[in-house]
Amino acid sequence: MLGLLSRTVGDGRRAKRALRSAQVLDGVVEAQLALVSRLPEDSRRRAADYLAELVMLSQSYRHFAAGWISRKELETRGAATMQRLTELRRPHEQAQFTEQD
């Protein structure tokens, strides 16, 4: 019985940490939204995609806190998010036109 109680208390702490992480991510997204609208269209699209990834990660933290997904699934989703963010940060080649174009 004591093992079950300590597991529940530990799960509660993990849930609170997960919810705090989700709130931090939400704060980052909220702070950046006003700036995104002032960017050029291509940059705006990339920034919006970046923020959308953060919103989805924050939702994953909430799902973990609610017990809907496991810690392993949260880690998997976090790693996938980091991979997508890395791809979004890579510079995209701009189309270059020559006189023949």
Image (cartoon, rainbow, N blue to C red):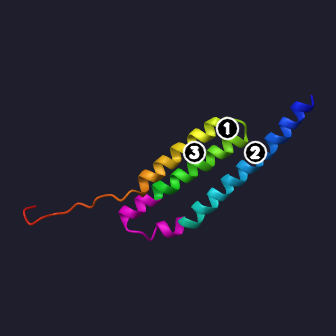
From which residue to which does the magenta span run?
Answer: 33-47
**Mark 1 Cα within 10 Å, few/some/many (few <14, many 20+)?**
some
10 w.r.t. 95: above or below: above
Left or right: where 5 falls relative to 14 = right
Q: Secondary structure at mark 3?
A: helix
Left or right: where 21 falls relative to 81 = right
Q: Quadrant of residue 62?
A: top right
Cα distance in 3D space between marks 2 and 3: 16 Å
* Residue at 53% across, 69% down: 34
Q: Quadrant of residue 27?
A: bottom right
| Residue 37 within the segment the image draws in magenta | yes
Sequence-wise, the earlier of marks 2 and 3 is 2
Q: Which residue is mark 2?
A: 15
Q: Main secondary structure of the magenta part?
A: helix
Q: Which residue is mark 3?
A: 78
* Residue at 37% across, 64% down: 41
Left or right: where 42 falls relative to 30 = left
* Residue at 67% across, 35% down: 70
Give the farthest residue toward the left.
100
Sequence-wise, the earlier of marks 1 and 2 is 2
Which of these two is toward me, 65 or 11?
11
Cα distance in 3D space between marks 1 and 2: 11 Å
Amino acid of disc 1: Arg
* Residue at 51% across, 53% down: 52
Amino acid of disc 2: Ala
Q: Mark 1 touching mark 2, by CB under 8 A?
A: no
**Mark 3 Cα within 10 Å, few/some/many (few <14, many 20+)?**
some
Percent of width and height locating residue 13: 80, 46
Q: Secondary structure at mark 2?
A: helix
Q: Which residue is mark 1?
A: 71
